[in-house]
Amino acid sequence: MGNCNSCPSKNKCNKQETCTIENNPNNKIKNIIGVMSGKGGVGKSTVTSLIAKQLNKQGYKVGILDADITGPSIPRLMGVQDQRAFSSNGVDIYPIITKENIKTMSVNFLVNDESQPVVWKGPIISNTIKQFYKDVMWEELDYLLIDMPPGTGDVAMTVMQELPIDGVIMVSVPQDMITMIVAKAVNMAKMLNVNILGVVENMSYIQCPDCDKKIKLFDGEDTDVFLSEMNLDLLGELPMTREIVEITHKGVDNVSEELDNILSNIVERINK
């Protein structure tokens, strides 16, 4: 059994008798939130980075654990892709800290070339995720965001079953919202008794540059029905804009007032 005194889920965990995760006594993490998607290419890592920066802007101490081992993009999104993590004693790993003081950990900080593939089997990847949780010196954090790989594979199960997460945020795009792709991820979380904080819909609409009218490319009524049937809250809708495209390619920097307001509302709903 892990050390419950250092666990962020102390006194609210229903698996204290079977918990096997080892908690680093140097780490005091108040909230752990997974960010997941049914498939790749929906902007999950971008949304993770944007939420992390918004939380940081509001005064919270934030960390990001990049659990997408075979497709890590957090280092580039956070502007720290040229840095490398180190250990002073061969056990504790020190995270990379961004210019905003956001702590990050990714497998790309452990390789010499970010384009070098990680050719590992499932058990090794799962053990790496657990090591990133317990051996990294996160110290005091208000929020640790876990950027999970797409789908419902080994890593998703490891995060949901063996890490004391407080909930997950689903990231989707409109055409996937009413299909089994999102439903599979949602049902997996429910099956493992993990709280679903809500859905962030990326690429939700485009905005007319002349009249500011929001133009949705897909039927919003179908989305509303799906959310109701799955008992999900819509945390926010991110537009399809050049700004977010540039964030994906160049990393997260200062955002527009409009995007800042959307992210602020998402964070407010997460904190409820």
Image: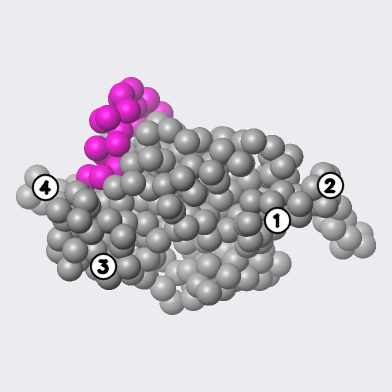
Above or below residue 267? Residue 93 is above
Q: Which mark is residue 10?
A: 3
Q: Looking at the image, tell me whether mark 1 or mark 3 is earlier in sequence order.
A: 3
Image quadrant of residue 4? bottom left
Q: Nearer the viewer, residue 43 or 221?
A: 221
* Whether label 1 touches label 3, CB < 8 Å: no
Boundaries of the magenta span: 113-131
Q: Looking at the image, tell me whether mark 4 or mark 1 is earlier in sequence order.
A: 4
Q: Is residue 152 left or right of residue 179?
A: left
**Disc 4 and disc 1: Cα gap in Å?**
46 Å
For the residue carrying disc 2, how many other residues have a C-alpha within 10 Å: few (<14), some (14-19), or many (20+)? few
For the residue carrying disc 3, how many other residues have a C-alpha within 10 Å: few (<14), some (14-19), or many (20+)? some
Q: Is residue 97 magenta?
A: no
Q: Looking at the image, tell me whether mark 4 or mark 2 is earlier in sequence order.
A: 4
Q: Which residue, given by chain and number where applicable, does mark 2 sit on?
A: 219
Q: Secondary structure at mark 3?
A: loop
**Disc 4 and disc 2: Cα gap in Å?**
51 Å
Above or below residue 152? Residue 165 is below
**Disc 3 and disc 2: Cα gap in Å?**
43 Å
